[in-house]
Amino acid sequence: MIDLTLVSSRPEDDHFLFQVFTAARPGAGAAWGLAPAKAEDLLRVQFAAQQAGYRARFPRAEFSIIHRGPVPVGSMIVDRSGDEIHLVDIALLPEFRGQGIGTRLLEVVQTEAEAAGLPVGLSVAKDNRALNLYGRLGFCRMADDGVYLKMEWRTRNGPPRSGQGLSCGGRQDSRR
Ligand SMILES: CC(C)(COP(=O)(O)OP(=O)(O)OC[C@H]1O[C@@H](n2cnc3c(N)ncnc32)[C@H](O)[C@@H]1OP(=O)(O)O)[C@@H](O)C(=O)NCCC(=O)NCCS
């Protein structure tokens, strides 16, 4: 069993959150043709805009730092204010990916959703490898705007879907 905890993020976590943000954009500076210092300046502007955007769009969301044991390994944002549990974002530092942490955290969210009788929703870029994970966990493709997919998971015991699911990966309740 992986020893994971979620701790509410505080302003002093911004340095760590920026590390997680930049780790998700490897080689950005080179791709922009900028010197490292200039690239970092631009990444800082993008990071601030992303954080402000999340806080504006999801003012009641829970912003957490993911710890494995005592070590901060990533961040997760979950909004419970609507008619679904919305996974706003989840990101791990590269060295902690592929070890089952994302699976474990999403299963906990699914268990919570099942108990509350709510679906879990998220958006993901169509070219993001995380699609494999969401498919394995039984998330269904509900909408496609060409760049992002809107995905949803419902427990088998929940109410029927209102929209037309495009396709579902794995079983609808993959945890059983
Ligand atoms: C997506 C993420 C949170 C999953 O957590 P994890 O602990 O790595 O996931 P698990 O080990 O439980 O499952 C492995 C799956 O994670 C996903 N994953 C692993 N590395 C990844 C990466 N660099 N980028 C995106 N997804 C990745 C894949 O779907 C992988 O399945 P696959 O090997 O069949 O492709 C984590 O990989 C990550 O932080 N990725 C980068 C940020 C990101 O893309 N976040 C999703 C935003 S919607």
Image (cartoon, grey):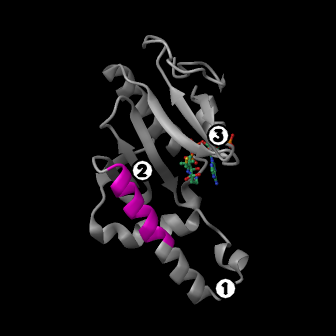
In the picture of the structure, the residue carrying the numbered disc 2 is 76
The first of marks 3 and 2 along the sequence is: 2
Q: Is residue 49 magenta?
A: yes
Chain-order first, disc 1 or disc 2? 1
Q: Quadrant of the N terminus?
A: top left
Residue drawn at (34%, 53%) of the image: 63
Name which residue lies at 55% across and 69% down. Answer: 22
Q: Which residue is denoted by mark 1 in the rendering?
A: 34
Question: What number is the disc on residue 134?
Answer: none
Disc 1 versus disc 3: distance between alpha carbons?
31 Å
The number of numbered discs placed on residues in the rendered structure image is 3
| The image quarter in which residue 16 lies | bottom left
Mark 3: C-beta under 8 Å from nearest atom of ligand 1? yes
In the image, taking residue 170 as reference, residue 176 lies left or right, namely left
Dot 2 amino acid type: Met
Tell which tag, 1 or 3, sits nearer the viewer.
Answer: 1
Residue at the spot of label 3: 131
Q: Choose the circle earlier in sequence order: 1 or 3.
A: 1
Residue 155 appears at what percent x and percent y? 46, 18
* Image vertical order of residue 24 relative to residue 121, above or below: below
